[in-house]
Image (cartoon, rainbow, N blue to C red):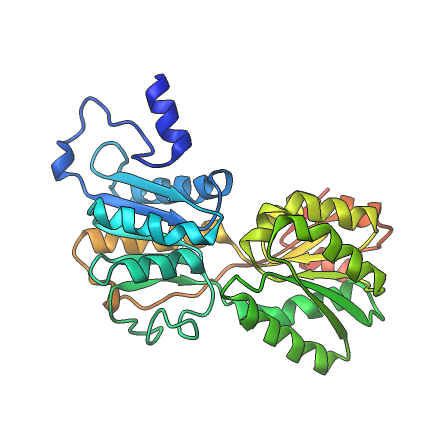
Amino acid sequence: MRRREFITLIGGVAATWPVTAHSQEPSSVPKIGFLTDESLSLGSVALQILSNALSERGYAAGHNVSFESRYANEHDLLPGLAAELVRKQVNVIFSVGTPATRAAKNATDSIPIVFSRIADPIALGLVKSLARPEANLTGVSVLTRELAAKRLQTVIQFIPGIKRVGVLFDPTFPPAPLELQEIERAASSLNIDLITMGVQRAEQLDAAVHNLMGQRVQALYIVPGILFTELRQRIAEIALENRIPTMFYRKEPVEAGGLMSYGPNFSDMYRRAAGYVAKILKGAKPGDLPVEEPDILELIVNLKTAKAIGLTVPQSLLIAADEVIE
């Protein structure tokens, strides 16, 4: 790989793959704008899945489609990045995450937007209905609120007799208040005391967790938020130090040493959303494509972490787990 191409890949600000010698002329190649609220290390995984899924549908990067990719794990950067994609006159924007989708929606009402990994799109004002989203948006939603009670119930199954659960949430992350409401509702019916702690910046994490530990919580429930995904390694380390179980919303934190997660298979969601991109490139209108919801929900358990914190995983949950990390 030439140095210039390498810099382009790392920066994520131009086509992610160099154009081959047999490519079409740039003016005839549709451009897909990729906008994510994640850093390059996480966001590039979603971009690769998107590219592979489109290739399977006849749209090969560097041949008959190109990418403009933008990454921003700091939400205040997203509006500017969305505006850049609009100026680039991309044919469709693939947005990953609620903040990225909001930024894209605010940047254009004409360029089609296909979203993935977002929370309740109706409650957040992104679409009018799931069946007919109208306007220029459609995609795949993650059922954030609907899964909150199930996550809390799973924590209780892991730790019989648990009474106090600490909750970490980022108040600046748009879906967080929605899930927090559902957790509180579920906790009330399950006779669980919740101790909530807001964290907006990385430097606040350690103090927040130690504060919760001082209030004798018996488990940590991490509300979905990009901040916590980026800090997954540190959260796992603190939890291990304090021998405290953790419940996450996606697989990566469990791979980093968290105890468990329950939620959609994000890779499958990206592939399904890629199908909408292909349809739009062929002339479909996003407003006519119904918003889909995940059909694959996974329970991931880190057995090594369970042993390290002295927790015996119930056999019923080991059987129910879609993946056990040993």
The x, y position of residue 247, in whole percent, is 69, 58
Q: Nearer the viewer, residue 291 or 205?
A: 205
Q: Residue at x 31, y 68 (%)?
A: 290
Q: Left or right of 196: which side holds 134?
A: left
The x, y position of residue 122, in whole percent, is 40, 74
Q: Residue at x 70, y 70 (%)?
A: 153
**Figure quadrant of the C terminus:** top right
Q: Is residue 303 above or below residue 6?
A: below
| Displayed quadrant of residue 184 | bottom right
Q: Left or right of 300: which side holds 83?
A: left
Residue at the outermost bottom position: 189
Q: Nearer the viewer, residue 93 or 297?
A: 93
**Figure quadrant of the N terminus:** top left
Q: Left or right of 107: which side holds 25?
A: left
The x, y position of residue 23, in whole percent, is 18, 28
The x, y position of residue 61, in whole percent, is 28, 35
Q: Is residue 232 visible?
A: yes
Q: Residue at x 34, y 71 (%)?
A: 127
